[in-house]
């Protein structure tokens, strides 16, 4: 399973990776809008942008969603077993597991509490 | 959890979120027609206000405004203070993320920086119509600076602040995050310095008991932090209503953190206000008169209902009620707080001047307590600046597509 | 020993005020009021400390006054009859518009006063040694004249931010639309003193000799003699602000 990996303090002055295992990957952001149907979205101010900025438009859970064409780069780690996760935690100290910002490829985010 | 389900909120949560009365009330904001109607309307109000302002300049402020010799500062100075407090507050609170790099504050950064530029510009618009010779300002501020004057420091530092914050916003748009951070740091320093100087403009007038002392600069900074949280919650919430986007977990956590800071600073302000009153009542006669007027006189409604009720208590209890989770309640708190904060500024500026200069000599030429009521011109200038903020906010949401920040 | 004192204390008899004639009582009360300053209209100190407060620091007082000439005005308050000739003269001399004033006569009224119920109190800019307005002005449009100590205006620099008006404890400033600047009393510097005259228009116009204008640093001047004496109270308005005004009040 892939996780986005981040730290609680963003090292704005360096472009170092948040952890050794991290690899930079292009992810596809999902663009959710709080409208029940695409038909209704046509009346909205953002519709054109949303429609043209993404592909695979669909209705989902009372919302509409599409995959943005503009990819976003993010640091990602792949951890597949609980043992690996524990190992990761032991290496980097306390971690939080959060819901990541909505991406097609990744659903969860690991945040390392310790500053680099 | 199945793959199909959205990863953040359950279906039930989403429905409750979108079906609360507040949300449905605000839903129209994202409709194309309603949006452009609002932009047009606010532009119209700005234009109208500018006409009022220019007309006031033409006929002379003495005729147009409600201020006079004994009360030279009125609604416009209050409005100016209101906007620059909001601006500095937006900068202070959001700097936790975009200057100091705390990840959980980063989602609110871009919108906050943009709005801090917008609100400081609104403040300058108000002061433009308050100062009698605004065109002399850039000339003599540079050629003949008075370093003992807080007004000079305030004006100059706010100039620097506007520059750095604008630069920071541009750098954020260009994704040059390191330079943006540096610019943001300089903006934060000049903003805090400028703002404490604004407090000192009042606090260092040794002829004015009501304001005099080190309280004002400290109060102004605490007040700015509270106003900043108010503005962040208010505008972020509305921003999401306009773009119709689903708030992701990171943004929600950001707002929750802002809410907690807000509650803290509301408590600080309550503490400050309480002690301001208690020490004031034990002070000199002039100060006692002013405080009594605030507590039980003509300004009692302003004070108790708007300043204490709307500005402090209602938002505080709404925040506690929301458990820092229910964004609708937090938004409602910010609406109350915004109204309250404006009255706070009016009370601060006007009540400091209402006690007549020579009241202790039993002078019959002036009443002990002077009266001030703003004219339509003054009201329109402040309304215009507010409309400018609304317009700039709406356009900002459209042009900058919901102010997404991408810092990893 | 203590017993002796106690017995003496107990043996003391109340003399009472019943036998004192009314006239004496009233006089006594009046003296008391003068001493406490209630009568004179504000807090009152010994003249020496008053002068020390009104001017710069006491050391400076011994060395001399900070300005030469150190222009000052002393009001003999009880002489003012509110004829307003001073105000009239000021308007004409300094082109003061009808909506503003540089000097004014305040009417003090107290029904509980034992003698006269009304007293007139002329006011103008106090040309303070520690002027709140000068400190507050962002552009040095108002400044303390280095030679004379007069608080003057450079009208062309004035932004009209009105901070000086808020800062002034004496309500001595107003915005002059014709000049596009804040205007105030300058002891007639521009209209008279700089042209060789030695007295302000208001002092010249006063028929009752209320306004005494002169150089406080000159021991021969009348203002010096009025301030440097102990017999009559001399006071300034609002000493608590720490502005150290150069306008004094006394009675004749």
Image (cartoon, rainbow, N blue to C red):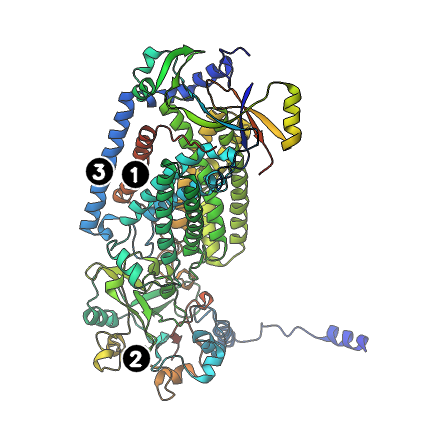
User: Looking at the picture, does residue C251 appear above or below residue B93?
Assistant: below
Chain hosting mark 3: B
Can you tell which mark lies on residue C209? Answer: 2
Looking at the rendered structure, the secondary structure element under dot 2 is loop
Query: Label 2 vs label 3: CA separation?
Result: 56 Å
Residue nearest the observer in this picture, B136 or A69: A69
Q: Which residue reaches farthest bottom?
A: C220
Name the quadrant containing residue B366: bottom left
Residue ID for mark 3: B48
**Category of crowding for the residue at label 2, using alpha-carbon neighbours closer than 10 angstroms: few (below 14), some (14–19), many (at least 20):** some
Is there any visible trace of residue B119 in the rendered image?
no
Q: On the picture, is C68 further left or further right than A26?
A: left
Can you tell which mark lies on residue B383? Answer: 1
Looking at the rendered structure, the secondary structure element under dot 3 is helix
Q: Can you give x and y, in whole percent of width and height, for residue A19 in the image? A: 57, 32
**Category of crowding for the residue at label 1, using alpha-carbon neighbours closer than 10 angstroms: few (below 14), some (14–19), many (at least 20):** some
């Amino acid at each position: 399973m892939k996780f986005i990996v981040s730290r609680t303090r963003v090292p704005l002055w360096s472009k170092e990776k948040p952890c050794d295992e991290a690899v930079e990957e292009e992810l596809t952001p999902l663009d959710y809008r709080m409208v029940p149907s695409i038909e209704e979205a046509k009346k909205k101010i953002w519709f054109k942008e949303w429609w043209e900025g993404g592909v695979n438009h669909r209705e989902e859970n009372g919302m509409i969603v599409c995959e943005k064409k503009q990819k976003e780069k993010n640091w990602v780690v792949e951890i597949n077993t609980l043992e690996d996760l524990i190992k990761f935690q032991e290496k980097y100290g306390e971690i939080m597991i959060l819901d990541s910002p909505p991406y097609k490829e990744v659903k969860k985010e690991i945040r390392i509490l310790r500053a680099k | 959890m199945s793959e199909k389900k959205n990863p953040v909120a359950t279906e039930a949560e989403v429905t409750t979120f979108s079906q609360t009365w507040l949300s449905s009330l605000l839903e129209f904001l994202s409709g194309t027609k309603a949006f452009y109607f609002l932009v047009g309307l606010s532009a119209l109000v700005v234009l109208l206000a500018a006409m009022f302002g220019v007309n006031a300049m033409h006929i002379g402020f003495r005729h147009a405004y409600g201020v006079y010799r004994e009360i030279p500062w009125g609604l416009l100075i209050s409005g100016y203070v209101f906007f620059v407090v909001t601006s500095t507050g937006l900068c202070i609170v959001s700097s936790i993320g975009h200057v100091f790099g705390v990840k959980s504050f980063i989602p609110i950064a871009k919108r906050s920086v943009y709005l801090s530029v917008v609100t400081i510009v609104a403040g300058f618009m108000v002061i433009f119509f308050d100062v009698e010779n605004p065109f002399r300002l850039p000339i003599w501020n540079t050629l003949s600076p008075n370093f003992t004057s807080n007004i000079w420091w305030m004006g100059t530092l706010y100039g620097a602040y506007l520059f750095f914050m604008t630069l920071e916003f541009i750098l954020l748009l260009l994704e040059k995050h390191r330079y943006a951070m540096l610019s943001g740091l300089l903006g934060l320093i000049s903003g805090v310095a400028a703002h404490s100087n604004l407090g000192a403009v009042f606090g260092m007038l040794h002829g004015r008991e009501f304001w005099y002392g080190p309280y004002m600069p400290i109060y102004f900074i605490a007040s700015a932090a509270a106003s900043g949280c108010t503005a962040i919650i208010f505008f972020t919430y509305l921003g999401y209503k306009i773009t119709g986007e689903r708030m992701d977990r990171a943004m929600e956590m950001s707002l929750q953190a802002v809410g907690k800071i807000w509650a803290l600073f509301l408590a600080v302000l309550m503490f400050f206000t309480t002690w301001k009153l208690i020490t004031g009542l034990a002070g000199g006669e002039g100060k006692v008169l002013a405080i009594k007027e605030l507590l039980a006189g003509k300004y009692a409604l302003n004070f108790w209902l708007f300043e204490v009720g709307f500005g402090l208590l209602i938002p505080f209890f709404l925040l506690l009620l929301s458990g820092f989770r229910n964004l609708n309640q937090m938004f409602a708190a910010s609406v109350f707080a915004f109204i309250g904060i404006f009255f706070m500024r009016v009370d601060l500026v006007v009540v400091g001047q209402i006690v007549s200069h020579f009241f202790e000599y039993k002078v019959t030429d002036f009443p002990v307590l002077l009266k001030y009521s703003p004219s339509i011109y003054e009201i329109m200038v402040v309304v215009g600046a507010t409309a400018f903020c609304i317009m700039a906010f709406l356009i900002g949401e459209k042009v900058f597509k919901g102010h997404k920040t991408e810092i990893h | 020993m203590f017993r002796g004192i106690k017995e003496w204390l107990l043996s003391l008899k109340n003399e009472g005020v019943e036998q004192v004639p009314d006239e004496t009582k009233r006089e006594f009360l009046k003296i008391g009021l003068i001493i406490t300053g209630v009568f004179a209209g504000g807090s009152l100190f010994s003249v020496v400390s008053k002068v020390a407060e009104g001017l710069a620091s006491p050391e400076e007082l011994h060395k001399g006054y900070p300005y030469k000439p150190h222009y000052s005005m002393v009001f003999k308050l009880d002489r003012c009859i509110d004829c307003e000739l001073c105000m009239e003269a000021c308007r004409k001399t300094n082109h003061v518009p009808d909506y503003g004033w540089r000097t004014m006569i305040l009417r003090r009224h107290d029904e509980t006063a034992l003698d006269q119920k009304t007293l007139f109190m002329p006011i103008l800019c106090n040309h303070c040694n520690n002027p709140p307005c000068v400190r507050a002005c962002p552009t040095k449009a108002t400044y303390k004249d280095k030679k004379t100590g007069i608080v003057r205006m450079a009208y062309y620099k004035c932004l009209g931010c009105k901070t000086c008006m808020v800062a002034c404890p004496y309500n001595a400033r107003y915005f002059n639309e014709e000049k596009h600047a804040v205007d105030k009393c300058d002891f007639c510097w521009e209209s008279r003193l700089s042209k060789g005259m030695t007295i302000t228009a208001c002092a010249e116009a006063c028929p009752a000799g209320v306004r005494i204008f002169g150089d406080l640093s000159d021991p021969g001047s009348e203002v010096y003699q009025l301030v440097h004496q102990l017999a009559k109270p001399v006071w300034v308005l609002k000493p608590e602000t720490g502005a150290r005004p150069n306008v004094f009040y006394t009675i004749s």
